[in-house]
Amino acid sequence: MLITLEGLDGSGKTTVWEALHDVYPDATFTSEPTDSWYGEAVGRSMGDPDADPLAELFLYTADHANHLSETVRPALADDGLVISDRYSDSRFAYQGATLARADAGIRRPLEYVRGIHAAFSRPPDATIYLDLDPETAAERAGRTDKFERDGYLAAVGDNYERLIDADPARFHRVDATRAPEDVVARVEDIVAGLVDR
Ligand SMILES: Nc1ncnc2c1ncn2[C@@H]1O[C@H](COP(=O)(O)OP(=O)(O)OP(=O)(O)O)[C@@H](O)[C@H]1O
Ligand SMILES: Cc1cn([C@H]2C[C@H](O)[C@@H](COP(=O)(O)O)O2)c(=O)[nH]c1=O
């Protein structure tokens, strides 16, 4: 089973992901961007305020393709539980928002990014969405990179809402404004329900 954690920067995904390690010691814990050289290329692009938005989309997508073949598909083939801190929905939400702002000539950016993935990706079985307003998200994340500005994060949040509307059965919304221990407990309950069913 593939479970993904999604949400705005600073919504608490990594905090939850780390807490789940103790509960599921045999699971494969992974994340995007990965720490492969593809992920390093993504990191270079993220650090460049003038990076071409289409080139950046394809760097993230290349990292995803490698993540699938090297980590996700092998673990699932062994009947394992895979828990990923960010996955394809991050691309749909973030690069969908970036392309919409960039005037890159893409008419329906979110649908375009989804379409690129349709041919090769493996959708998550379930996705936990840590729901946080963009102002608090930017505050928590420290506004350190080009993605962490609240105006941009508001557009990303709108895209996540569109994704949830399109596939409500897959998404499990968690109120990420609550205290960390409450958020962790809620996510652990959801994951237990998913794994047991
Ligand atoms: N529920 C919470 N309430 C308040 N602060 C929190 C909560 N969860 C996490 N934090 C704090 O917010 C910051 C970001 O948390 P974390 O790294 O888990 O988020 P993230 O979603 O993985 O962020 P990013 O996408 O930017 O990597 C950290 O300082 C963390 O301690
Ligand atoms: C996977 C992925 C990530 N991003 C953005 C979101 C964050 O601002 C950074 C790094 O993520 P992290 O959780 O802080 O490590 O990258 C993106 O725009 N598109 C993606 O596909």
Image (spheres, grey):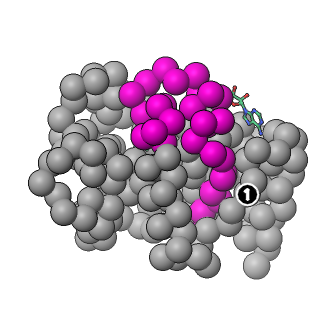
Quarter holding residue 63: top left
Q: Is residue 123 above or below residue 168?
A: above
Residue 133 placed where, x, y %? 63, 45
Which element is circle 1 on?
strand
Q: Which part of the image, by quadrant, shows the N terminus? A: bottom right
Residue at the (49%, 46%) spot, across then down: 154
- List x then y, in percent, for residue 177: 76, 44
Q: Quadrant of residue 164?
A: bottom right
Left or right, residue 3 beside residue 42 = right
- Amino acid type at circle 1 is Val
Residue drawn 53% across and 74% down?
165
Q: Is residue 88 left or right of residue 27?
A: left
Q: Residue at x 12, y 54 (%)?
A: 105
Looking at the image, residue 51 lies above or below residue 18: above
| Observer-nearest of 132 and 3 | 132
Range drawn in magenta? 124-153
> Picture coordinates of residue 107 (x, y %)?
19, 63
Pointer 1 residue: 174
Rendered location of residue 168, percent (x, y): 59, 76
Query: Left of 153 or right of it: where is 7?
Result: right
Rate crowding at label 1 as few (under 14), some (14 to 19) or many (20 or more) other CA atoms within 10 Å. some
Q: Residue at x 55, y 37 (%)?
A: 9
Q: Is residue 62 left or right of residue 152?
A: left
Is residue 35 visible in the rendered image? The answer is yes
Q: Is residue 1 above or below residue 62?
A: below
State which quarter of the image contains the C terminus. bottom right
Q: Confirm whether residue 78 shows in the render.
A: no
Nearest the viewer among 72 and 188 is 188
